[in-house]
Image (tube, helix red, strand yellow):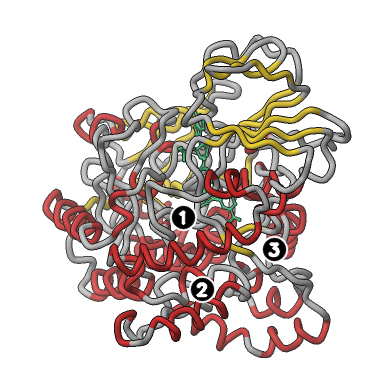
Amino acid sequence: MTDQAVMESRAAAAGRTEPQYEVVVIGAGVGGIYQIKRLTDLGINATVLDNSGDLGGTWYWNRYPGARFDSESYTYGYSFSREVLDEWHWKERFSSQPENLKYLNFVADKFDLRKHMQFNCTVDSMRWDEAENIWHLHIKEGDREVTCRFVITAIGLLSIPTPPRLPGMDDFKGQSWHTFYWPHEPVDLKGKRVAVIGTGATAIQCIAAIAGEVGSLTVFQRRPNWSAPLNNSEISDEEMADIRARYDEIFETCARTPGGFEHEPDRRGFYNVSREERVALWDQLYEMPGFAIWLRNFVEIFVDEQANAEFSEYIADRIRQRVKDPKVAEKLIPRDHGFGVQRVPMETNYFEVYNQDNVELVDISETPLERITEKGIKTSDREFEFDVIVYATGFDAITGGYDRIDITGANGVKLADKWKEGPSTFLGILVHDFPNMIMLAGPQSGSASTNFPRGIETGVNWITDLLQYVWDHGHTRVEPTAEAEQNWTEHVKKMYSSMLMRKAKSWFTGYNSNVEGHEEGTIRYFVYNGGAPKYVQKVNEVAHNDYRGVLFG
Ligand code: NAP
C-alpha cells in the first residue's frame, strides 16, 4: 500500500472528509521542483500550483540582459541526483538566465515532474478549516477552489517586483517595464534612448549588458551600491570533468561554510595581520571569481565598523581607478553604508560603462525624480526623453509573496495582520495559528540567506522528514507552539544585533521605499544570520527531539 492509500483508508475509518490533495506546493521554482520530486517519490497525492506560464520561478521571469548566477553554477545546481550531476554540463562559471531555465527544465523533464504541475494558477487566498484540518485555496483564474491537508509555500524571496510609486507612469508613450517582467520575446534596443532607474544587483547586471548596444543610456541612481568583479569564465569539458569528480567535496565545502558557497572566511583576525597582508589578500580576492571578495574576506568586515571602513576605502580606490571622470567616480562610491552590509552585486565591466560617451549618471539624491511623462522622466531640474524606461527597482522581499495571498489561519487570524510589523516564525518553517502551512525558504529561515539551492535542499529534506513523521504517526495537524515561535524569533533578532547589516537600508532589513509601511524606520528581521551550518544544526536538533516545539494532532 502506498502512503497515500494508507492515509485514505485511515481517513475513511475516522469518517473525515478527504481533501483533493494531501499536499499542495505553491511555486514551481527551484524549491517547488525539488519538493514535488520528494513528495511524488513517496507516492503522495501532491500538486504544484504556479501563477506563471511555466516552471522556473526566478529564472522563468527575470529575462533582462545580463541576468545570471553569482553563485558558482556547479554549487547552484541540485545535489540530490548523481545522474543530474553527471549529465549536466555547466558552460559558464556563472551561468546565464536562459541556460539556468534550460537546466531547471532538464531536471523537471528527467523526472517527469511537469505532470504534477499546474500553471497559470494564482493562489490569491487560503483559508484553514479547523473542523476538517484542511486548507481551502482559492485560485484566481477560473475562480475555483482547491483543498489540501498541507500547503508548502515555495513562493520565493524576490518574486514580487516593486516599481516606483511615481505619478504619470501610465502616461509614458514608449516601452517600459520592471526588469522582472522583461519581455519574453527579443527586444531590440539598438540605437534607442534608454533609462534605467535603480543601481542594485539587477541594474548593475543589466546596465553593463546593454550599454554597448543602446543609442544612449541614462542611469538614475538614488544610492550607489558597493560592487566588485564577477570574474566569470567558460567551463571547458576538462574542467567540467574535474568538477564532476569533485562534486562530493564541493558540496561538503558548501555545507561547512556560512554562506553555503565554496568561499570560506579568513579567520586569521583582521587586526592580527599587518595592513600589507590585508591589502595582499584583497588584491587577490578582487581577481577571484564570485563572492570571494565578500565571503573569503576577514570576518570582521561584517561586524566591526573600523575594519569595514578600511576595506570599503580599498574598494573605493578600485572604483576611482576604473572610472575616468573623478566626479562620476565619487558618485559611484557609497557613503551611507560599508561594503558587504547590503547584498553585494557582482559586476562585469560595470564601472567602465561610465567611461562611455553614450552613458550618463543622474544622481537623483540631488535632483529627485518628480514624475514620468509622456516622453520620458522629469527630475527636479530637467526633463529627459526616452524610448524605453527600465525599472530595476527591486522587490517586496521575503514576506511580499505572503502578503499577496489573503491567508486566514486558525481562530480567524490573518497572516498579514500577524506580520504587520515583521514576520515571526518557528525555524522560518512554521507559524503559530497557521497549522499545516509549511514554508520553504520562509522568512527567518537559513534557507533564505544562503546560496539558494543549498538552503532549499536543507529545507525540502527537513520538511519531507516532518511530513513523513506526521504520516507515520497518523497525524493530520502540525502547528508550532506560541512559545517556540517567540523563542526562535528572539534568537533571529538577537543575531542581527552584532551585524553591521542591521543598519543598512536593504531588503535584508525589510526596507523598500516602494512598499507602504516598508519605508525607512522599521527593521524587519527577515533572515537568519547564523550561517548555514548553525541553521542545519538547529533544525536537526528539533527533528531529533521528536520535533520539540511542534504540536501534532
Ligand atoms: P535592490 O537591490 O532592492 O535594488 C533596487 C534599486 O532600485 C536600488 O538602487 C534602489 O535605490 C533603487 N530604487 C528603488 N526604488 C526606487 C525609487 N522609487 N526611485 C529611485 N530608485 C529606486 O533590487 P535588485 O537590484 O532587483 O536586487 C534584489 C536582489 O535580487 C539582490 O540583492 C539579489 O539578492 C537578487 N539578485 C540576484 C542576482 C543574482 O543572483 N545574480 C541578480 C540580481 C538580483 P536605493 O538603494 O536608494 O533604495
- Residue located farthest toward the left when viewing the structure as drawn: 483
Q: Quadrant of residue 214?
A: top right
Q: Nearer the viewer, residue 151 or 364?
A: 364
Q: Nearer the viewer, residue 139 or 261?
A: 261
First in sequence: mark 2 vs mark 3 = 3
First in sequence: mark 1 vs mark 3 = 3
Image coordinates for residue 168, horizontal then vertical, percent: 58, 11
- In the visual, does 380 lie left or right of 210? left
SS of the residue under disc 3: helix
Residue at the spot of label 3: 107
First in sequence: mark 1 vs mark 2 = 2
Q: CA distance from mark 2 to mark 3?
A: 22 Å
Q: Nearer the viewer, residue 327 or 51?
A: 327
Q: Amino acid at mark 1?
A: Arg
Residue at the spot of label 1: 343
Residue 485 lies, with reference to residue 34, above or below; the image says: above
Count residues near mark 2 (Cα–Cα under 10 Å), then give few for <14, some for 14-19, many for 20+: many
Image coordinates for residue 52, horizontal then vertical, percent: 64, 37
Q: Nearer the viewer, residue 267 or 11?
A: 267
- Residue under the image location 29 percent in, 48 percent down: 14
